[in-house]
Amino acid sequence: MKRRQFLKSSAITAAIYPLTSCSDPVSKKSTAPKEKSHIISLSFDDGFKKSFHRVAEIHENYGSQACLNVIASGHLPSFQAIDPWILPELMGDFSDWNDLVGRGHEVMPHTWEHKNLTKVSLSEAKERLDKCFDYFNANLDGYSHDTAVYN
């Protein structure tokens, strides 16, 4: 499937989904979940300060919220460049992320340091995940392990 065809199909599905029957045929009462759910989510990774604020602004202009996935240690002095485009000086910090959460955007964990966890031992991968989740729990307003999505 080509990209354009996929996007059109996804948009049509997203538009039609709310129209599909989510009610009890006898009582006509809605059986749809009461909590917010995502049908389609465009997510933005890594935690670039400038672009994440711009993405949030664009979403706000359309009355929606952004899905932003953050490298937990991206703002720390120990963070090192990963690729030519993931540079320490481009990364935001938890002051930025808390501001965006306060404006209604979703900020989720996207690794501790952006290492490929398939290239380390299972115990090391678990340690890095725990470190990431613990840091989010301590530093991101309203963060909950129960509702978080690791991206």
Image: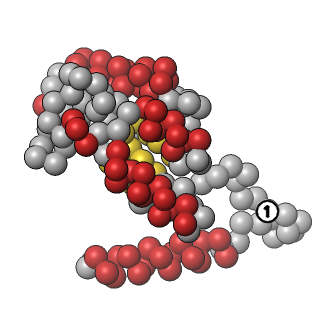
Q: Residue at x 42, y 51 (%)?
A: 53
Q: Residue at x 65, y 71 (%)?
A: 18
Q: Residue at x 34, y 50 (%)?
A: 50
Using the image as rendered, state which of residue 72 and residue 151 is in the foreground.
Answer: 72
Query: Residue 122: which quarter of the image?
Result: top left
Q: Is residue 146 visible?
A: no
Residue 95: image location, x then y, percent: 46, 33
Residue type, numbered disc 1: Ser
Which quarter of the image is occupied by the N terminus? bottom left
Q: Residue furthest right?
A: 27
Residue 70: image location, x then y, percent: 36, 39
Q: Is residue 38 above or below residue 62?
A: above
Q: Is residue 141 left or right of residue 74?
A: right
Q: Is residue 75 left or right of residue 35?
A: left
Using the image as rendered, state which of residue 21 and residue 72 is in the foreground.
Answer: 72
Q: Is residue 134 above or below residue 13?
A: above
Residue, disc 1? 30
Q: Is residue 80 visible?
A: yes
Residue 76: image location, x then y, percent: 28, 25
Instruction: Tell me the colour scheme of the image.
Output: secondary structure
Mark 1 element type: loop
